[in-house]
Image: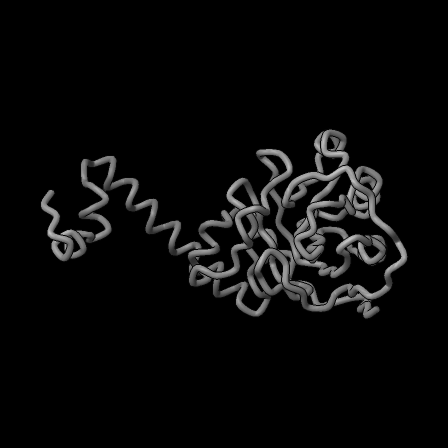
Amino acid sequence: MTVLHDFPRPDPALVEAFRTQSPATLHEALGRKGAMVHPIKPLYPGMRLCGPALTVSCGPTDNLMIHVAVALAKPGDVLVVDFKGMTEAGPWGDVLTAAAKARGIAGLVIDGCVRDAITIRGMDFPVFCRGTSMKGTNKTDAGGTVNIGIACGGVLVSAGDLVVADDDGVVVVPQAQAADTLAKAAAREAAEEGYREKLGEGETTLSILKLHPYLDAAGITV
């Protein structure tokens, strides 16, 4: 077992700035990196989260380290759990959700499943996962880690990285690249707003995005 009790978190103002960005835009701004695999989606539509990652590795049938992580979390943290993609157990349920809310945790991202889904929905706690499983887990394996780098949903995640998620999925922005990615995301949003204005004026995406060379190469006439 390896547990780091704390880690450097990004500036709160930076986290707030990320809260207005969409995962899709951040993924593009990051060079089309950082997006977790498709199966990891919100437990219910409309869930959103943003905050620094508190990383956990455990499982695939044990959730002891998740309990440790919740105890160590600070308000605003997002638990990011590598549960090895296991879908035949639910290491997170309503009791851990109540514990997380009491500590001000912003949400959960887990490469695995959860249970007590209906209750969690009523608790207004964002959960992003592979699905649901009613099967319980053990609390005997101390071989996991907390606040050590993990791979979750096909993405390397370090404690303190920015995690942003909505109905499109989950994106992770390395803390060292956060400010630069935010600036690129803002520029992308500004450019897309310009595209929308031109579309309203009657232009097509073919001209706005300068796609005619691709059409010419394919022998397509529009």
What quarter of the picture does the C terminus occupy?
Answer: top left
Task: Say left or right for 100 vs 162.
Answer: right
Q: Is residue 102 visible?
A: no
Who is closer to the viewer here, 96 or 22?
96
Looking at the image, which residue is at 66% across and 50% down? 109
Residue 209's spot in the image, x, y percent? 24, 51
Who is closer to the viewer here, 106 or 42?
42
What quarter of the picture does the N terminus occupy?
Answer: bottom right
- Looking at the image, which residue sits at the far front? 88
| Residue 129 image-quadrant placement | top right
Q: How many marks?
A: 0
| Residue 166 image-quadrant placement | top right
Looking at the image, which residue is at 20% across and 36% down? 201
Looking at the image, which residue is at 14% across and 57% down? 217
Q: Is residue 114 visible?
A: yes
Task: Say left or right for 9 vs 46.
Answer: right
Residue 179's spot in the image, x, y percent? 52, 64
Residue 89's spot in the image, x, y percent? 76, 45
Residue 9's spot in the image, x, y percent? 69, 63
Say how the picture is coloured: one colour
Task: Say left or right for 51 vs 201.
Answer: right
Task: Say left or right for 173 vs 58.
Answer: left
- Looking at the image, which residue sits at the far right? 140
Vertical arrangement, residue 177 with respect to residue 88, above or below: below
Looking at the image, which residue is at 12% across and 48% down? 220
Vertical arrangement, residue 201 with respect to residue 182, above or below: above
